[in-house]
């Protein structure tokens, strides 16, 4: 198992449970306790956790804990690919679309070569680099300030630009979807950007794997009723599914 994969597991445990017990996790994933302790030392240096006897606990800023892009990119890859394939059913030749940042939206960007005459607006630098050489896509990259280790542009310049647009569709990502239907983000600086993307589109499609449900994020983006379609994987629970459908939002399971 790669170091990034191990740390992604640790991030998840800390985020969801609030603690990690070394021996228990070592047995669960078949990694030595010494290796997990070394990973926890690294995460403690990053401010993600505080090491305790036998394990570690999440730091108080857990709801604002942002996972580095390279770690997120390696998580739930099969689910993200299936979600992206389903999202392609909403992309038509000639569309003007807004692509939010994140690894699930990036999975969709990898498939856009199958359409023609697209206009794509994004503040995700990884997506922009991928699409820049595609002759079938008119790429518009927002201005803004680049964020280290996340590869997105943020700031008032991004929000102000998106507010001037009107697009056919926005493909939105999420850090967390609460049990009350609130979509939220761990980084408050991205919230006005996402809100502008929602307001700019005739149709909003939320792409999110099931691990994002029943997770607490720091700042509210919008209510799930403000999106038209939710595409997620089969890992979503019955309660989570009912929460969405009773609000008359279309759900597509992949």
Image (tube, grey):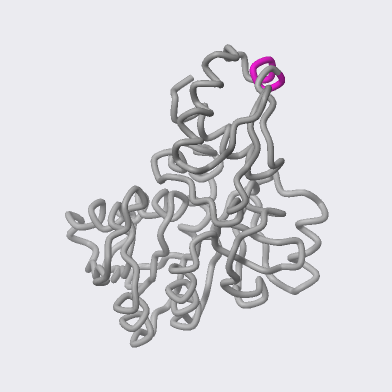
Q: Is residue 58 above or below residue 135?
A: above
* Residue at x 69%, y 26% (from the top left corner): 21
Residue found farthest to the front:
53
Percent of width and height locating residue 35: 52, 16
Figure disc tally: 0
Magenta residue span: 24-28
Percent of width and height locating residue 120: 31, 68
Quarter of the image where one finds residue 141: bottom left
Residue 120 among those drawn in magenta: no
Task: Locate residue 186 relative to residue 151 in the image: left or right.
Answer: right
* Residue at x 65%, y 21% (from the top left corner): 22
* Residue at x 43%, y 54% (from the top left corner): 102
Task: Locate residue 182 relative to residue 187 in the image: left or right.
Answer: right
Q: Nearer the viewer, residue 218 or 83?
A: 218
Q: Nearer the viewer, residue 227 or 91?
A: 227
Percent of width and height locating residue 88: 46, 57
Q: Nearer the viewer, residue 96 or 156?
A: 156
Q: Magenta: predominant secondary structure element?
A: helix
Task: Locate residue 187 relative to residue 118 in the image: left or right.
Answer: right
């Amino acid at each position: 198992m790669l170091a990034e994969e191990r740390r992604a597991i640790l991030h998840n445990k800390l985020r969801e449970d609030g603690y990690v017990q070394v021996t228990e996790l070592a047995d669960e994933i078949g990694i030595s306790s010494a290796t997990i302790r070394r990973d926890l030392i690294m995460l403690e240096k990053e401010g993600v956790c505080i090491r305790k006897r036998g394990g570690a606990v999440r730091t108080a800023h857990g709801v604002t804990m942002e996972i580095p892009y390279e770690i997120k990119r390696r998580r739930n890859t099969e689910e993200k690919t299936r979600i992206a394939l389903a999202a392609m059913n909403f992309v038509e030749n000639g569309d003007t679309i807004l692509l939010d940042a994140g690894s699930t939206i990036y999975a969709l960007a990898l498939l856009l070569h199958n359409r023609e005459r697209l206009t794509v607006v994004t503040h995700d630098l990884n997506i922009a680099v991928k699409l820049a050489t595609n002759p079938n896509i008119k790429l518009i990259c927002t201005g803004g300030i680049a964020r280290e280790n996340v590869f997105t542009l943020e700031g008032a310049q991004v929000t102000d630009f998106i507010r001037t647009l009107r697009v056919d569709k926005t493909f939105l990502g999420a850090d967390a979807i609460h049990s009350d239907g609130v979509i939220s983000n761990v980084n408050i600086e991205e919230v006005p950007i996402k809100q502008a993307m929602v307001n700019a589109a005739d149709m909003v499609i939320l792409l999110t794997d099931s691990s994002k449900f029943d997770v607490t994020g720091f700042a509210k983006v919008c209510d799930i009723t403000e999106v038209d379609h939710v595409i997620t994987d089969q890992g979503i629970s019955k309660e989570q599914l009912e929460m969405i459908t009773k609000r008359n939002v279309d759900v597509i399971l992949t």
